[in-house]
Each structure stands twice: as structure tokens, then as C-alpha cells.
């Protein structure tokens, strides 16, 4: 007798059949996205921890540096971006690990829906409950650094464009380390070098806005990296998951 695995998003196998019946792709992806979103809403403490970490790290720098407006404005973009990266990585380790433990990951691998699209749905959920919140709260934190209204708006826009890249690239690292014990350090070593260009161009856009220079080049590069990552990251993560589950 077949039983559905815990935490599954797919129906159980019918009795007497050896394969799962085909299901439409988009309803399956939507069901997975909503399932992960419900799980994230039940774990409000994890989301709150990442948000509090972001706020505390960004707020400590003005206290440590002192009331030097020019220095604070110079360091603000880098501080906010590094804090956003570290905060978004707090929950990356659980992106696939929980599904691997309760058996849902095996069902996703057997699903008729394309695995890269299922992986993309999980990455989208991660960004929605982490990166989006960090981008929305960043204008309030920018007040501590004395950024102009233009620089503050550019900071928020750069985070809205760049934090999805953190989730996409981080998802590859999470897939490569799924099933590895104490994978947090390994995940950081894999992800941090890959996201360095995102931090450079994201913070560079804010610096350019503060100096009255053009920001089009920075946003164009971020957009190009995002378009490339939307196509390649789910494929790479799906391949890593198949290898890990063999």
C-alpha cells in the first residue's frame, strides 16, 4: 500500500499502479510555491531572525564609526549590501534540506513537472520571505547614514534587483550541499565568491547616484546577471539535486 510522504505537495500513487499520473506543470509549481510560502509563514521566527539580524548589523556601523557624515555616506552602500547578503544566507541551508529529510525532495525528482521550474519556485519563495523584506526596509536604515533621497531610492531599487540573484545563486550552493552534515561553512565558501559581482555593482550604483553620476550601467549589468541567473541557476541546482539524490 502506497502512502504519501510527509510534507508532500503531490498526491499519492493510486493502488496497483507503478508510476505517478501526469499532472499539469503550472498547478504543480503553484502548489509547491504556496506550500513553501505557508511553511515560511508558520516559521515567522526564522523570518524575524533574518530581519532583526539585518537591522542590527546595519545599525551597529554608525554607532561604531561615529557621527562623521561623509564617512557614513561613503560606507553605507557596502554595509547595507553585505548585511543583506549575510541575512539572506541564514535560511539558505534549509532551502532543500527539510525536503530531503521528509522525503518531499524525492517526490519532486519523480514529478512529471520539470525539476528546474520546481527549483525556481522554491528560490522565488526564499526571495519573497527574505530578500524582498530586506529591500523594503532598507530606506529606513539608510536614514542612519545620511543618504540623500536619490541615493536611498537607488539603494532600495538595487536591492530589489540584486537580492533575487542572492536567492538564485544561493540556491545552487544549497543544492550542492544538500545532505551534507554541518553544511553552513561549505555553503558560505561556495556562495560568497559567486555573489561578489552582485555586491560590487549594487553598491556601485548607490555610490554613483550619491556622486551625481549615471547609474544605468550598474543596473544594466545587474539586470543582465539576473536574466542569466533566472535561466541557468535552476538548471544547475536541479542537476546538483539529481546528483545528490543518486
Image (spheres, helix red, strand yellow):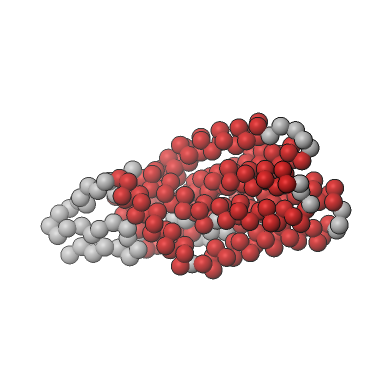
- Name the residue: 40% across, 54% down: 33
Which of the 4 image quarters holds residue 14? bottom left
Which of the 4 image quarters holds residue 206? top right
Front one among 186 and 74: 74
**Quadrant where the image shows the N terminus:** bottom left
User: In the image, 36: left or right of 144?
Assistant: left
- From the top left corner, tell me how far across and down residue 38 is, in percent: 42, 62
User: In the image, 244: left or right of 58?
Assistant: left
- From the top left corner, tell me how far across and down residue 109 is, in percent: 33, 49
- Name the residue: 80% across, 46% down: 74
Front one among 2 and 145: 145
User: In the image, 96: left or right of 4?
Assistant: right
User: In the image, 1: left or right of 8?
Assistant: left
Which of the 4 image quarters holds residue 116? top left
- From the top left corner, tell me how far across and down residue 27 is, in percent: 31, 50
Q: How many marks?
A: 0
Residue furthest front as drawn = 149
Residue furthest left as drawn = 16
- Name the residue: 62% across, 35% down: 219
- From the top left corner, tell me how far across and down residue 212 is, in percent: 77, 35
Front one among 56 and 155: 155
- Name the residue: 66% across, 53% down: 138
Residue 152 in sight in this render: yes
Residue 246 in sight in this render: no
Amino acid at each position: 500500500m502506497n502512502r504519501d510522504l510527509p510534507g508532500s505537495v503531490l498526491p499519492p500513487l493510486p493502488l496497483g499502479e507503478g508510476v505517478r499520473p501526469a499532472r499539469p506543470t503550472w498547478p504543480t509549481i503553484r502548489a509547491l510555491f504556496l506550500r513553501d510560502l505557508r511553511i515560511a509563514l508558520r516559521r515567522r521566527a526564522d523570518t524575524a531572525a533574518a530581519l532583526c539580524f539585518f537591522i542590527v548589523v546595519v545599525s551597529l556601523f554608525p554607532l561604531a564609526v561615529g557621527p562623521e557624515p561623509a564617512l557614513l555616506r561613503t560606507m553605507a552602500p557596502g554595509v547595507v549590501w553585505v548585511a543583506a547578503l549575510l541575512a539572506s544566507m541564514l535560511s539558505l541551508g534549509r532551502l532543500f534540506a527539510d525536503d530531503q529529510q521528509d522525503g518531499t525532495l524525492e517526490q519532486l525528482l519523480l514529478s512529471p513537472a520539470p525539476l528546474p521550474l520546481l527549483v525556481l519556485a522554491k528560490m522565488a519563495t526564499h526571495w519573497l520571505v527574505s530578500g524582498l523584506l530586506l529591500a523594503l526596509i532598507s530606506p529606513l536604515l539608510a536614514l542612519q547614514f545620511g543618504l540623500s533621497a536619490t541615493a536611498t531610492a537607488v539603494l532600495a531599487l538595487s536591492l530589489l534587483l540584486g537580492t533575487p540573484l542572492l536567492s538564485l545563486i544561493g540556491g545552487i550552493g544549497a543544492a550542492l550541499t544538500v545532505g551534507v552534515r554541518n553544511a553552513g561553512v561549505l555553503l558560505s565558501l561556495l556562495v560568497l565568491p559567486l555573489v561578489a559581482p552582485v555586491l560590487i555593482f549594487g553598491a556601485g550604483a548607490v555610490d554613483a547616484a550619491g556622486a551625481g553620476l549615471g547609474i544605468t550601467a550598474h543596473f544594466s549589468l545587474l539586470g543582465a546577471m539576473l536574466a542569466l541567473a533566472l535561466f541557468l541557476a535552476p538548471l544547475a541546482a536541479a542537476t546538483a539535486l539529481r546528483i545528490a539524490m543518486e
